[in-house]
């Protein structure tokens, strides 16, 4: 699996310090070995929404508070966004989460 990180995510990740940065680095390393055909088997990955474009978005749990929004394109994992979980409610209604 290849990892691709959106520019805005790269900028956000550079601002992280210490333990948070290490957790994200570990999560990215774990994503390298994820089987996109068996996402349901990974306890750190939850399906978020399916965009009208047909792209499936997932949330990857990085520790207790931080989350990565990811998608898959063939053999490539795209890190679409990074956020703290308490911010999710402002972007996605409870009824849309799966």
Image: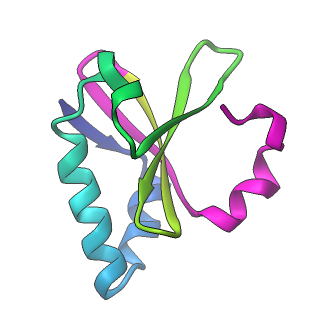
- When the figure is inspected, residue 69 is found, relative to residue 38, above or below; the finding is below
Rendered view: 54 above or below 8: above
Q: Would you identify the image quadrant in which residue 14 lies?
A: bottom left
Quadrant location of the C terminus in the rendered image: top right
Q: Position of residue 18 (x, y in %)?
A: 30, 87
Q: Residue furthest bottom?
A: 18
From what the image shows, is residue 43 above or below residue 27? above
Q: Residue at x 34, y 29 (%)?
A: 41
Q: Is residue 76 left or right of residue 16?
A: left
Give the color scheme: rainbow, by chain, secondary structure or one colour.
Answer: rainbow
Q: Which residue corresponds to the image point at 40% horizontal and 46% vertical from the top-left?
A: 44
Q: Is residue 6 left or right of residue 34?
A: right
Residue 85 image point, x, y percent: 62, 62
Magenta span:
73-98
Identify which residue is drawn at 55% across, 19% down: 55
Viewport quadrant of the N terminus: top left
Compared with residue 97, is residue 16 higher up or lower down, i.e. above or below?
below
Foreground of the two, 40 or 5: 40
Residue at 30% x, 40% y: name it.
Answer: 4
Magenta-span inclusion, residue 63: no
Q: Is residue 66 left or right of residue 21?
A: right
How many numbered callouts? 0
On whether residue 85 falls in the magenta region, the answer is yes
Classify residue 96 by image quadrant.
Answer: top right
Q: From the top left corner, tell me how far across and down residue 27 is, in percent.
A: 28, 56
């Amino acid at each position: 699996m290849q990892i691709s990180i959106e520019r805005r995510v790269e900028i956000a990740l550079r601002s992280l310090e210490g333990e948070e940065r290490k957790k994200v680095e570990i999560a990215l390393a774990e994503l390298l070995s994820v089987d996109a055909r068996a996402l349901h088997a990974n306890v750190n990955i939850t399906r978020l929404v399916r965009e009208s474009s047909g792209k499936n978005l997932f949330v990857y749990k990085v520790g207790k508070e931080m989350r990565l929004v990811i998608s898959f394109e063939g053999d490539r994992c795209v890190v679409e966004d990074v956020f703290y979980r308490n911010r999710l409610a402002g972007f996605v209604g409870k009824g849309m989460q799966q």
